[in-house]
Image (cartoon, rainbow, N blue to C red):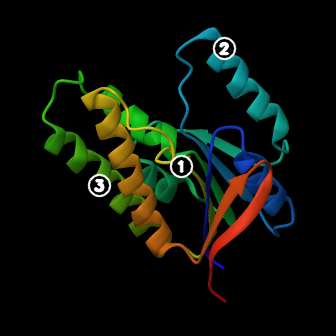
């Protein structure tokens, strides 16, 4: 398999599974983190994630244009983990003030995901992508939150269509939604 998408709710075990799958991989690993530390609590989360990764993995921290940046920095990596698309889409939203035209934000999200898909299709590395499923709860009360949910859902669908394998995590357990051989 070349592309695995791991989705699920918050704290469902997505990142842990991505790391476990990659520990079994052969060859160099590139870990792409999309989180930015906006406050002390988030900085602690980021540091905990750093500590959970093997020291010999190369880590890059990018908040946007990850397809282009992976292409430039992949080197000899045989496996690439991207953690996570949820924060990548959030980073795009933060580039706007929330009152911007939703079509402009959607175009930016779609362009970001298309760029990532192109990167993966042009690479011989295996990709493991982590994302959240945010569409299982109630409909958000405000327009910006609904737009975020909708666009993350669109990004996830685009990636799932491209992926060879899609895993849904719940309570630390994987449910295989798509598996091609």
- Give SS at disc 2: helix
Q: Nearer the viewer, residue 88 or 53?
A: 88
Q: Which residue is mark 2?
A: 41
Mark 2: few, some, or many residues within 10 Å (few <14, many ≥20)?
few
Q: Residues within 10 Å of mark 3 (few under 14, many from 20)?
A: some
Position of residue 89 in the picture relative to residue 9 (left or right): left
**Percent position (x, y) of residue 163?**
53, 73
* Residue in the image at 46% along x and 64% along y: 159
Which residue is painted at 31% across and 48% down in the image? 109
Dot 3 and dot 1 residues touching (CB under 8 Å):
no
Q: Which residue is mark 1?
A: 133
* Dot 2 or dot 1, earlier in sequence: 2
Relative to residue 100, is residue 150 drawn left or right? Answer: right
SS class, disc 1 = loop
Nearer the observer, disc 3 or disc 1? 1
Residue 155 in percent (x, y) is at 39, 55
Quarter of the image for the N terminus: give it.
bottom right
Q: Quadrant of the C terminus?
A: bottom right
Residue 29 position, x and y percent, is: 73, 57
| Residue 81 position (above or below residue 118) | above
- Image depth: mark 2 or mark 1 in front: 1
**Precedes in sequence: disc 3 or disc 1:** 3
Disc 3 from disc 1: Cα separation = 17 Å
Q: Is 83 situated above or below 176?
A: above
Label 3 or label 2, whichever comes before in sequence order: 2
Instruction: List x then y, in percent, for residue 4.
Output: 62, 68
In the image shown, does 78 or 181 lie closer to the viewer?
Answer: 181
Kindly report the distance in space between the C-alpha atoms of the residues bearing marks 2 and 1.
22 Å
Residue under label 3, please give it. 110
């Amino acid at each position: 398999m070349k592309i695995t998408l791991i989705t699920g709710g918050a704290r469902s075990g997505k990142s842990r599974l991505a790391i476990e799958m990659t520990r079994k991989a052969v060859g160099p690993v590139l870990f792409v983190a999309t989180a930015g530390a906006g406050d002390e609590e988030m900085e602690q989360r980021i540091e905990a994630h750093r500590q959970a990764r093997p020291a010999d993995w190369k880590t890059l921290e990018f908040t946007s244009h990850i397809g282009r940046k992976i292409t430039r920095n992949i080197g000899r990596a045989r496996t690439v983990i991207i953690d996570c698309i949820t924060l990548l889409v959030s980073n795009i939203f933060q580039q706007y003030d929330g009152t911007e035209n939703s079509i402009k934000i959607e175009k930016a999200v779609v362009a970001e995901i298309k760029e990532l898909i192109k990167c993966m299709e042009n690479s011989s590395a295996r990709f493991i992508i982590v994302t959240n499923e945010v569409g299982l709860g109630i409909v958000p009360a405000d327009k910006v939150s609904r737009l975020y949910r909708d666009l993350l859902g669109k990004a996830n669908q685009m990636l799932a269509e491209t992926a060879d394998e899609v895993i849904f995590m719940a309570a630390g357990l994987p449910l295989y939604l798509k598996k091609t051989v």
